[in-house]
Image (spheres, coloured by chain):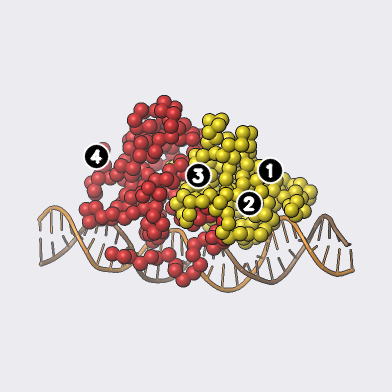
Chain colours: A red, B yellow, C orange, D brown
DNA sequence: AGGTTTGGTCTGGTGAACAGACCGACCCGT
DNA sequence: ACGGGTCGGTCTGTTCACCAGACCAAACCT
């Protein structure tokens, strides 16, 4: 299909100033540092794969979502695959490697902004133990990959309840990276 | 002093849509998700404390730097202290808690964008061992706090050499969070 | 007294985000 | 075959944030 790369090709590439930096952090931020990008990726870890699900869950404008997805694909963080005639957006290996960043930032937000109650809890799928603040499973003594985690709602979920498909699916425990909606149907419940 | 909070108080607060999210990641991004913010904080970890040093090292506009510093202070990530008649910007406890995020994102950029050579290497100050990709010291078996780390240039530093004071100071090993420039003088030499 | 450094503020121009309208392809029931 | 719904977008006008660069006040140096 070879869809054109949107992203204002006339101007200076995204990180004016960023690219002056020797540090790899700057280059990482050129890929995932834009508004919405990390939230999109977090949803991908939760198993969200469809354009509409992302759009509804994040309340993001269609144009911006399109732009972000294109950028992430362009940088090898996501791939687009057709399933059922509709595109699905999946994390690549590089994308899955972003989990520690997303997890640690989320933990930081949990402790240092408004209320200490976690909105989501994560447990190691193979042994059932909850992981600690640096992502370790105390039973196994290791840091599980995201695909071995199960998300479930925590005590901080009550506020600001949303009613979209993704939010409803995440009201129950869910294995990370497994699809959150099957085709188009509503979620069992 | 009670300086006015800049940040477009007429409009919707920064994260339009972000604040709809139950997830703490969204709130974290409201604080540190803006352009330049994580790079500023990385420099703070390196020991940069002065407005001018940040400005020169990052090549950031004065107005934006002012805005970001104000935002970070407002959210308790930095504090402004007067030393020598000039303000210094220091990481608070909450600010220092962002180190895992910055470190993991930097590691990701190192491996997944252009070249596998680390620009900076980190070693545990108390034992001298280099820390691994998840921040652990193999000798001590723990994850050292950033104040116990020493930064030094790695093999990937060669490209894009900069000549500002901060870049020159970081050409030698440096204990994290200790001031990178003493008052106004050039760095020893 | 004049110049320099420091730490800003202000302004005009430009690029990016937003809401919301529009649109083609496909599916589904009738 | 036709109408309606869903999916995955594109387009447009307006608002907002970023940028370069000018300006500025206080402190310090000579």
* Chain letter for the residue marked with disc 4 in the picture: A
Ranked by sequence position, the earlier of labels 3 and 1 is: 3
Name the disc covering residue B69, or none. Answer: 2
Q: Which residue is mark 3?
A: B104
Q: Left or right: where does residue D6 sit relative to residue A100?
A: left
User: Residue sitting at 36 percent across and 49 percent down?
Assistant: A91
For marks 2 and 3, give the CA distance: 23 Å
- Give coordinates of residue B64: x percent, y percent: 61, 58
How far apart marks 1 and 4 lie (CA) works out to 56 Å
User: How far apart are the two marked residues, 3 and 1, measured between alpha carbons?
Assistant: 21 Å
- Residue C2, image x, y percentages: 85, 69
Q: Is residue B16 in view from this perspective?
A: no
Point out which mark residue A188 bears.
4
Q: Earlier in the sequence, mark 2 or mark 3?
A: 2
Q: Quadrant of residue A150?
A: top left
One can see residue A24 in this view: yes
Label 1 secondary element: loop
Mark 4: few/some/many CA within 10 Å (<14, 14-19, 20+): few
On the same chain, marks 4 and 2? The answer is: no
Alpha carbon distance from label 2 to label 1: 19 Å
């Amino acid at each position: 299909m070879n869809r054109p790369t949107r992203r204002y090709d006339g101007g200076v590439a995204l990180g004016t100033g960023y690219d002056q930096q020797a540090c790899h952090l700057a280059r990482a931020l050129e890929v995932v540092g834009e508004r919405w990008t990390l939230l999109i990726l977090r949803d991908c870890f939760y198993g969200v794969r469809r354009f509409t699900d992302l759009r509804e869950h994040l309340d993001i404008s269609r144009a911006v979502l399109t732009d972000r997805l294109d950028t992430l694909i362009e940088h090898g963080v996501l791939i687009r695959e057709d399933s059922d005639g509709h595109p699905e957006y999946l994390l690549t290996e590089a994308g899955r490697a972003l989990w520690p960043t997303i997890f640690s930032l989320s933990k930081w937000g949990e402790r240092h902004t408004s209320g200490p109650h976690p909105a989501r809890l994560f447990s190691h799928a193979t042994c059932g133990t909850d992981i600690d603040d640096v992502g370790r499973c105390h039973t196994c003594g290791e840091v599980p990959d995201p695909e071995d985690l199960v998300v479930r709602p925590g005590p901080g979920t009550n506020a600001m309840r949303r009613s979209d498909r993704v939010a409803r699916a995440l009201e129950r425990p869910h294995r990370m990276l497994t699809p959150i909606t099957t085709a188009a149907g509503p979620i069992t419940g």
